[in-house]
Amino acid sequence: MNFEEEIALLIKSRYPLLVVDTIDEEYVLTQLGEVAAAQGLQFYSWSLTKGLRVGKNDNSFYKTNDAVAMLRVVNDLVGDPHAAVFALSDFDRYLGDAAASRFFKDILNRIKGSPATVVLLGSEGKLPPDIAPLAARIQGGYPNERQILDEVNKAVAQFKLTAAHLHVDLPGESLRRMVKTLKGLSLQQVRNALNLCMLKDLRFDKADIKEIEKFKKAAFDREGVLEYFGSEQDNAIAGFGNLKRWVGDRRNSFFSDGPLPPPKGLLLLGVQGCGKSLAAKVIAGELGIPLYRLDLTRLYSKYIGETEENLRKALATVERLAPVCLWIDEIEKIFASSSGDIDGGVSKRVLGTMLTWMQERKDRSFIAATSNDINNLPAELLRKGRFDEIFFADLPEAAGRMEIARIHLAKRDLAPADFDVAALAKASEGFSGAEIEQAVISALYSASGANEKISTRHVLEQLRLTRPLSVIKAEAVDFIRGWARERNILPV
């Protein structure tokens, strides 16, 4: 259900109190007004600055800027009984006052089971413990794809009135990608992003998708534990043929409403530096959906209950963004202390919340999780149903190492044909993709320091100086490779 359908159902169910977490108050007030009108309910709105008004009328009830005075009027209105929706902006901030809190509870008890509902609007407002059980809480203020498309068309039309030279070139597929990229932003954020794109160069085309991605990354980096990432095309990664085929077979099912259920996600185990994180970006690119990483450094908090709240908000955001790819890098770090003995049970509760969400979610979100340490992965995470499949990323074979060398040379504007990539592949046996990349980077520094043009010799020298992880931590690498082999984990 979208926001409008969900709020309509809750009002019909005669909840006395609804809490809408939103950063776009204007959008939610409009939606609430439409829902109330559709159900034949009178709509009232209140804010400290504008007082209590009928709908969004400019005229307010006498002296209702004060919270307690407003509650007296609401109390009189619901005494009829009155079939109505009361939208109160930022009112949770006044519940610390004894008089306001007591009056508010009296009103809620009075309207239980009646056709009157109070809706609190704000950004993650907290309720007192004696009021919270009366409330249903939902996310709001985030337009769906149809509404975003309408906003794009409206923005183009309005901009052309003031800038006749605006050049628009957005064929169907590019427009679809742009709308999906804008999803998850509030209506005002959508407008801001579109205006920035058009003002920048008086052009509106597929190049602006990258600009919107930057805007979105900045917005989400400020908001919380999800970090926006750009996706990659499949030619950015060497090998991984089985993984690419697996994702390709399920791409159509991810978006269709046919008999096949959409894929839920996969777990990538493997040796460090073998491309698991890059694979997550490629998966998002193959599915054509945005990629967000769960930032573990922001998830955990020293305050009681805040870690679980951070996770709840992050998962709610994922549901609002769907379809989306959620990248959980080194997932074992979330559950490293899942026994709960060290952290007072926090990791145990986080594990329970995460597992339940992974099992029960109905939205079209795809999880791409990676792990380097299978010893710290709880058994519950590995069973079927949490992930559709588990893949293992091993150290690359000779052909893979040749392709990795070509990719990283080309990435730095070097012509792979000018290098003996077969010799590089032979010299890098036992190396991970990350170690080969670092050898190329170090060779560039070495050649620059000697004032020479980089050649195969420089890269070979850096490979010779490097002791790969498969040598430094041979026991750990052999263990994880043996573990995957014994359990027939699918190679990437």
Image (cartoon, grey):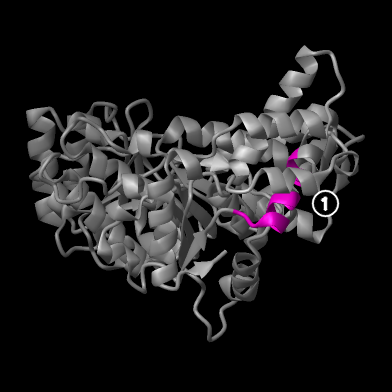
Q: Is residue 403 magenta?
A: yes
Q: Quadrant of the C terminus?
A: bottom right
Identify the image quadrant of residue 359.
bottom left
- In this picture, residue 342 sits left or right of residue 18: left
Of the pair 266 and 458, the residue shown nearer to us: 458
Image point (53%, 57%), residue name: 394
> For the image shown, how many numbered marks are present on the structure?
1
Of the pair 44 and 228, the residue shown nearer to us: 228
Residue kind at label 1, given as amino acid type = Leu
Of the pair 32 and 175, the residue shown nearer to us: 175
Image point (10%, 44%), residue name: 341
Identify the image quadrant of residue 269.
bottom left
Image point (34%, 66%), residue name: 382
Q: Quadrant of the N terminus?
A: bottom left
- In this picture, residue 223 sits left or right of residue 352: right
Where is 421 relative to 5, above or below? above
Q: Is any atom of residue 236 visible in this view?
A: no
Q: Where in the figure is residue 367, as x and y percent of width and height?
A: 46, 59
Mark 1 — residue? 170
Image point (62%, 34%), residue name: 215
Q: Where in the figure is residue 323, as x and y percent of width and height?
A: 54, 60
Where is 321 relative to 193, above or below? below
Magenta-colored segment: predominant secondary structure = helix
Q: Which residues are magenta?
A: 396-408
Where is 450 relative to 22, above or below? above
Q: Where in the figure is residue 327, as x and y percent of width and height?
A: 48, 50
Q: Is any atom of residue 46 visible in this view?
A: yes
Q: Where in the figure is residue 306, as x and y percent of width and height?
A: 23, 37
Q: Is residue 399 magenta?
A: yes
Q: Secondary structure at mark 1?
A: loop
